[in-house]
Image (cartoon, helix red, strand yellow):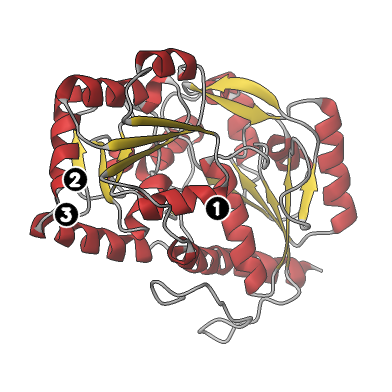
Amino acid sequence: MSAPGAPSSLPAIDAAGRGWAGLRVAMVCPYSLSIPGGVQGQVMGIAKAMRELGVEVRALAPCDGPPPEPWVSPLGASVPTAANGSVAPIAPDPSAALRTIRALRDEQFDIVHLHEPLVPGPTLTALVFSDRPLVGTFHRAGDIAWYRALKVPGRWAARRLSVRCAVSGLALATARRALGGQYELLWNGIDIGLVNAASAWPTNGPTVLFLGRHEPRKGLAVLVEAVMQQGVDARVWVAGDGPQSRALREATMGDARFEWLGTIDEEEKLRRLRGADVLVAPSLHGESFGVVLLEGMAARATVVASDIAGYANVARGSRDAFLVPPGDPAALAGALQKALAGGPEVKAMQESAYQRAAAHSLGALAQKYLELYEPLQAERQRRR
């Protein structure tokens, strides 16, 4: 694993002397890799880390435009679909299924790794039709509609997985409740070196950054109320868009504290994280694992977030972040003011948060997945 703050430079042979060169892995994602998202970020990050280890990884996924990397195999355009209080860009059409089957047949992978195995589209297609060892990672938590819809066939299909993983305790409990079975708990990861390499976006004073889709469960309306009604004195960068964007922009019209950025790319996101004093994540529910919190912690922004299970797993209250009751504008405003005031308590929190983020590197996560692949590949070779 790279030292905290250093760019990732992983060897082709790990600390145990194992070489991964020549291993062919399909990393299958159900969501469009052209659209930012937590699962998409993990798929791309893990694939890149494994490729640095010498693994031949291809990401198979929908793409709404050119694929983001040469090693991404696009499976067609996505269709926005309501899911878990959000909108998921999935590709459940027959043409995407046929492209998935063709890619799995032509590429002759050793391992097929499915992220969200039961989401209609490429991952569910691969789960049913692939004849290679299957690893499944479950990301979502809460009441998942397609788990209910596929309860009986879903349990049958899930038995085809050689290994089941979950990114958080909540995701694990959700999958086990719906599908049964045993799971490996592997937290999400971030690229610490990439965060630290970004140059800070310039700002003229205390600055708060919000990153996320503008939908009710993300709590942006709570943040707007906290700033406007409770007198938070800071510039507020609001990145992203969604169904609430127009109404909330109109509500803040004339308030110079708010700067609406729209959708931003990965480079600008990292630069904004480095430039902001505070990262705010006021989500109300539906968060399985707060990768955005880890990114803020790695950027040494003070984190202010809702005290929900998916976030409390990542940032420890009063040690790594200010955690407040979800949906409480007054409490959120109070925490923002404390974070912006700085001082020894905030400095200590930033340092603790950075060290915790450094422990969640994508390089270490890739190694853990490869250790799970190893016996599957050995068994496959033995049978051959």
Q: Position of residue 131 (x, y in %)?
A: 78, 50
- Residue 362 or 147: which is nearer the viewer? 362
| Quarter of the rendering containing residue 118 | top right
Question: In the figure, 161 relative to 285: above or below?
Answer: below
Label annotation for residue 319: 3
Q: Position of residue 364 (x, y in %)?
A: 47, 68
- Rounded to the nearest whole Å, what is the CA distance between mark 1 and mark 3? 28 Å
| Quarter of the rendering containing residue 70 | bottom right
Q: Position of residue 229 (x, y in %)?
A: 19, 19
Marks 2 and 3, the one that precedes in the sequence: 3
**Mark 1 Cα shell of 10 Å, populated few (<14), some (14-19), many (≥20):** few
Label annotation for residue 343: none
- Rounded to the nearest whole Å, what is the CA distance between mark 2 and mark 3? 16 Å
Quarter of the image for the C terminus: give it.
bottom right
Residue 339 seen in render = yes
Look at label 3 and name its amino acid: Arg
Q: Does residue 120 appear left or right of residue 294 in this picture? A: right
User: Disc 1 designates what residue?
Assistant: 267
- Residue 161 or 56: which is nearer the viewer? 56
Count of marks, rendered view: 3
User: Disc 2 designates what residue?
Assistant: 340
The residue at 75%/62% (across/down) is 110
Residue 183 seen in render = no
Q: Does residue 217 appear left or right of residue 243 in this picture? A: left
| Quarter of the rendering containing residue 101 | top right
Q: Is mark 2 on a helix, strand or loop?
A: helix
Between circles 1 and 3, the one closer to the viewer is: 1
Q: Where is residue 34 in the image (x, y as percent from the top left)?
A: 68, 40
The residue at 50%/84% (across/down) is 15
